[in-house]
Image (spheres, rainbow, N blue to C red):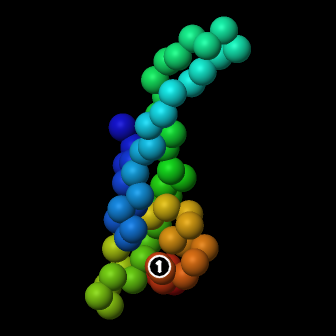
Amino acid sequence: MPATRCEICGKGPQFGAQVSHAHNVSAKKRYPNIQRVRAMINGAARHIHVCTRCLRSGKVRKAA
């Protein structure tokens, strides 16, 4: 199973209910967009799992 939690902000799956027009309710899970990137961590390049919001906001510096 792929990683479901961001190593920077801790964002993980959200739970909810899918409700049909007939009001049948079933459980639903939404996963954040997690990417595996090579990033500079404490001066060394490492592979980490990061959500795209952290990538866009500049919280992660990608390794060259």
Question: Is any part of residue 34 visible from this angle?
Answer: yes
Q: Look at label 1 and name its amino acid.
A: Val
Res 22 → quadrant: top right
Residue at screen point 57% across, 11% down:
24
| Residue identified by numbered label 1 | 60
Q: In this view, which residue lies farthest toward the bottom?
A: 43
SS at mark 1? loop
Q: Residues within 10 Å of mark 1 (few under 14, many from 20)?
A: some
Choose between 18 and 37: the one closer to the eye: 18
Q: Is residue 36 left or right of residue 47?
A: right
Q: In this view, which residue lies farthest toward the right?
A: 21
Percent x, y of residue 46: 34, 74
Seen in the picture, residue 20 relative to 5 is either above or below; the reply is above
Seen in the picture, residue 8 relative to 31 is either above or below; the reply is below
Percent x, y of residue 50: 44, 64
Q: Is residue 24 left or right of residue 63?
A: right
Choose between 41 and 25: the one closer to the eye: 25
Percent x, y of residue 42: 29, 88
